[in-house]
Structure formats: C-alpha cells, structure tokens
Image (cartoon, helix red, strand yellow):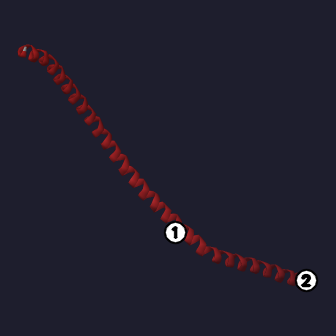
C-alpha cells in the first residue's frame, strides 16, 4: 500500500516538475519578445518627447508671429490714416491749384 502513495507522490512531483519546466520554456521564449517590446516602447517615448519639443517650439514661434502681426496691423492702420490725411490735404489743395491757374 505504501508503494501506491509513493507512486502518487512521484507522479505529483513529476507533474509539478513538468509545469515548472514548461513555465521556464515559455518565459524564456517570451523574454526576448518582452525586451524587444520594451525597446520599442522606449523609442516611441523618445519620438513622442521630440515631437512635443518640436510642437512647443512651433507654438512659441506662432505666438511670436501673432504678436508681430498685431504690431504690423497697428502700423498698417496708422499708415492708412496718414495716407487718408494726405489724400484729404491733396483734395483740399487741388481746388486752390485750379483757382490760381484760372
């Protein structure tokens, strides 16, 4: 009867050893894939960081250009006012010019 218990114990030990060996084979097969996935994740993170840096730089350039556009629009309005004043002066002068020639 003892031999039955011994054979059951040996069978259970063999089954546990088989599970452990199978786990080690599976994990050793997956380890290179996991390392490759980690490396790809790091590369993607680096790309994302560089894209964010480029995006931030572009945003700063856009803000600077918007400020410059606002300043140039103000200058354009001022120049437009000066041109309009000049044209009004010319309109006022032209009748005088014609009166003097007659």
The one of 41 and 31 positioned closer to us in this rendering? 41
Mark 1 Cα shell of 10 Å, populated few (<14), some (14-19), many (≥20): few
**Whole-percent x, y for residue 59 in the image:** 37, 46
Name the residue beneath numbered marker 2. Answer: 4
Name the residue beneath numbered marker 1. Answer: 39
SS for dot 1: helix
SS for dot 2: helix
Residue lying at 45% horizontally and 62% vertically, measured from the top left: 46
Residue lying at 22% horizontally and 28% vertically, measured from the top left: 78
- Between marks 2 and 1, how big is the CA–CA gap? 52 Å
- Which residue is the extreme one toward the bottom? 3
| Depicted 10 relative to depicted 60: above or below | below
Residue lying at 29% horizontally and 35% vertically, measured from the top left: 70
Residue lying at 79% horizontally and 80% vertically, measured from the top left: 13
**Whole-percent x, y for residue 16 in the image:** 77, 77
- Which residue is the extreme one toward the right? 1
Left or right of residue 18, residue 50 in this image: left
| Depicted 60 relative to depicted 93: above or below | below
Quarter assignment of residue 6: bottom right
| Depicted 62 relative to depicted 16: above or below | above
The one of 23 and 86 positioned closer to us in this rendering? 86
Quarter assignment of residue 21: bottom right
Mark 2 Cα shell of 10 Å, populated few (<14), some (14-19), many (≥20): few
């Amino acid at each position: 009867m003892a031999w039955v218990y011994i054979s059951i114990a040996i069978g259970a030990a063999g089954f546990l050893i088989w599970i452990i060996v199978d786990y080690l084979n599976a994990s050793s097969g997956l380890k290179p894939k996991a390392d490759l996935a980690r490396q790809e994740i790091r590369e993607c993170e680096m790309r994302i960081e560089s894209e964010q840096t480029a995006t931030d730089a572009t945003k700063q350039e856009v803000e600077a250009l918007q400020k410059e556009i606002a300043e140039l629009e103000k200058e354009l309005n001022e120049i437009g006012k000066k041109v309009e004043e000049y044209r009004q002066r010319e309109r006022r002068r032209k009748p005088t010019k014609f009166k003097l020639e007659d």
